[in-house]
Structure formats: C-alpha cells, structure tokens
Image (cartoon, rainbow, N blue to C red):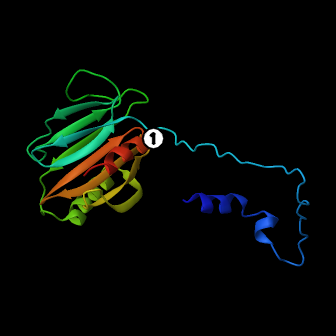
C-alpha cells in the first residue's frame, strides 16, 4: 500500500477530501497571507501481528516430503506396520521416545505417515475408504474441504468428532502413487497448521 493511498484511506471521510467544490458543503476559508497557521500531523502506530509458534521443519529423505511442527513439541519416528513404511508421531508434551499409550489432559497428538494402499494414486478412493472406516467407528465428519498444498498436490482436510471424545483433524494427500496421511486430536487449530504445512 502506498503512503498516498494510505492517506486517502485514513482521511477519506473528511469533508475536505470528499466534498471539495460541492455547493452543499461549506468551504473552510484559508487564513490571510502572513497569519500564523497550525500544522497537524498524524502518526501511524506500527502494525504488529501476534507472533505464531516457533516452528521446526522435518524432511523425510526417503519419500521426499516435509512438514513443519512447533519447536516445543516432540517428534518421533515410529513403526506402524508394512502398510506405513514411514511414520512420525508428534506430541505436545515430553515423554520417553517411542509410541505413547495415552494423551494427557490438554495434550495434542498427531500421526503423519506414508500409506501403501490400493488403488494407487487415487485420493478420492483412499478418502472414501477412510470415511467408511470412520462411519463404522461412529465418527462424524464435521468439516471437509479440498485444498492445494505448497507443493501443488491436492489434499482433503477437515475435522471429525466422536460423541464424548472431542474433535480430531485429518489431511490426506497423494505421495507419488502412495498416500500421505496426517491425523490427530487435541488442539485442532495447531494440528491443522501442521497438516497444511505438508509439502
């Protein structure tokens, strides 16, 4: 935004700017030559955005994807089985390395993993399988949308809920002919920030 435009936006409602020459608006007379004048100045306060969390980036060399996560969270590489050859667990609390059995009150957890599923490279079919599994587990999709990630890949993301268990987050995208899945529960806004950083 230029200073001129900013000035017009700030002063745009002034009769001096909006009604010059209008017969219905009284004109303010100029002081006679040589009279003392008053100068008015405006000072703009700097606009500062509230700082977000400090983020770290993890890059998986084997499968060629990256994601950002809060610096105060714990990242573990975990083993989930043959269908998930690369898997990561993110937790908002410190614990012994490895898979955790439970989430403490107020904690957040996320799993980001490569999924080897058939059919290959068909995001809609993969998401349909996940929806069927959620329906069988009495999970409800509260919100779902399609987005484009920073790497140009299409992704499906949203929020799910289970009665009395709270809300969870999900993001599915393709990774070549395979899939990348990010799911978690806890602070949905933070989980979504992490999920949308996948590239």
Q: Secondary structure at mark 1?
A: loop
Quarter of the view holding residue 34? bottom right
Picture layout, residue 82 above or below residue 27: above
x, y percentage for residue 140?
Answer: 39, 53
Residue at the far bottom in the pictured view? 23
Relative depth, front residue between 35 and 76? 35
x, y percentage for residue 182?
Answer: 27, 47
Residue at x-position 23% and y-position 20%: 96
Picture layout, residue 20 above or below residue 154: below
Q: Name the residue tied to disc 1.
A: 164
Residue at x-position 59% and y-position 43%: 46
Which image quadrant: the N terminus?
A: bottom right
Picture layout, residue 13 above or below residue 20: above
Are there few (<14), some (14-19), or many (20+) residues within 10 Å of tag 1?
Answer: few
Residue at x-position 31% and y-position 23%: 94
Quarter of the view holding residue 68? top left
Relative depth, front residue between 108 and 31? 31
Relative depth, front residue between 195 and 131? 195
């Amino acid at each position: 935004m230029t200073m001129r435009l900013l000035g017009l936006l700030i002063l745009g409602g002034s009769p001096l700017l909006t009604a010059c020459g209008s017969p219905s608006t009284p004109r303010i007379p100029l002081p006679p030559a040589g009279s003392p004048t008053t100068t008015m100045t405006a000072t703009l306060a700097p606009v500062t955005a509230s700082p977000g969390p400090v983020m770290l980036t993890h890059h998986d060399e084997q499968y060629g994807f990256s994601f950002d996560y809060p610096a105060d969270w714990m990242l573990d590489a975990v083993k989930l089985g043959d269908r998930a050859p690369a898997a990561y667990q993110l937790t908002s609390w410190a614990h012994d390395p490895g898979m955790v059995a439970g989430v403490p009150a107020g904690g957040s957890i996320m799993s980001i993993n490569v999924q080897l599923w058939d059919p290959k490279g068909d995001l809609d079919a993969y998401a349909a399988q996940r929806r069927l599994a959620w329906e069988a587990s009495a999970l409800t999709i509260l919100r779902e949308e399609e987005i484009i990630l920073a790497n140009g890949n299409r992704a499906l993301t949203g929020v799910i809920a289970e009665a009395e268990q709270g809300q969870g987050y999900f993001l599915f995208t393709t990774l070549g002919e395979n899939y990348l899945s990010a799911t978690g529960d806890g602070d949905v806004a933070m989980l979504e920030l992490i999920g949308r950083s996948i590239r």
